[in-house]
Image (cartoon, helix red, strand yellow):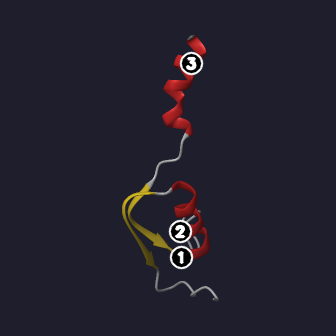
Amino acid sequence: MKKLITLILLLPVLASAQLSGTYLVGTGQASPFNSLPNAIARINSVGVSGPVVLAWLATSPLPSP
């Protein structure tokens, strides 16, 4: 029973939070928002809980198609 209670208490810490809001994407940003493919992969892996805006930094080169 103690193990179950511990698991229930740790579950929110172990799970990744879904994304919501505006995120800057481009060179110099923390991973996974340092590139557009990484940012999209993050959205696909954790999901969204509201509107998400990916704002591309003008100083970063655009990724190749």
The image shows residue 43, relative to residue 12, as above or below, that is below
Label located before the other in sequence (1 or 3): 3
Tell me the quarter of the picture where residue 40 sits. bottom right
State the residue in front, 26 or 3: 3
Task: Count the marks.
Answer: 3
Residue under circle 2? 29
Report the quarter where the C terminus lies. Answer: bottom right
What amino acid is at disc 3? Leu
Residue contact at pointers 1 and 3, CB within 8 angstroms: no
State the residue in front, 31 or 40: 40
Label located before the other in sequence (3 or 2): 3
Which residue is at a point 52% across and 63% down the rendered structure image? 43
Q: Position of residue 46 (x, y in %)?
A: 53, 54
Residue contact at pointers 2 and 1, CB within 8 angstroms: yes
Q: Which mark is residue 47?
A: none
What amino acid is at disc 2? Gln
The image shows residue 58, relative to residue 42, as above or below, that is below
Which residue is at a point 53% across and 29% down the rendered structure image? 10
Q: Could you tell me how far apart the alpha carbons at marks 3 and 2 are, in whole angstroms? A: 38 Å
> As drawn, is 16 to the left or to the right of 53?
right
Q: Position of residue 60 (x, y in %)?
A: 54, 83
The image shows residue 18, relative to residue 15, as above or below, that is below
- Which residue is situated farthest in the top direction here? 1
* Crowd tier of the residue under label 3, counting other residues whose Cα lies within 10 Å: few below 14, some 14–19, many 20 or above: few
Q: Could you tell me how far apart the alpha carbons at marks 1 and 3 are, in whole angstroms? A: 42 Å
Residue under circle 3? 4
Secondary structure under tag 3 reads helix
> As drawn, is 7 to the left or to the right of 24?
right
Secondary structure under tag 1 reads loop
What amino acid is at disc 1? Gly
Residue under circle 1? 26
Secondary structure under tag 2 reads loop
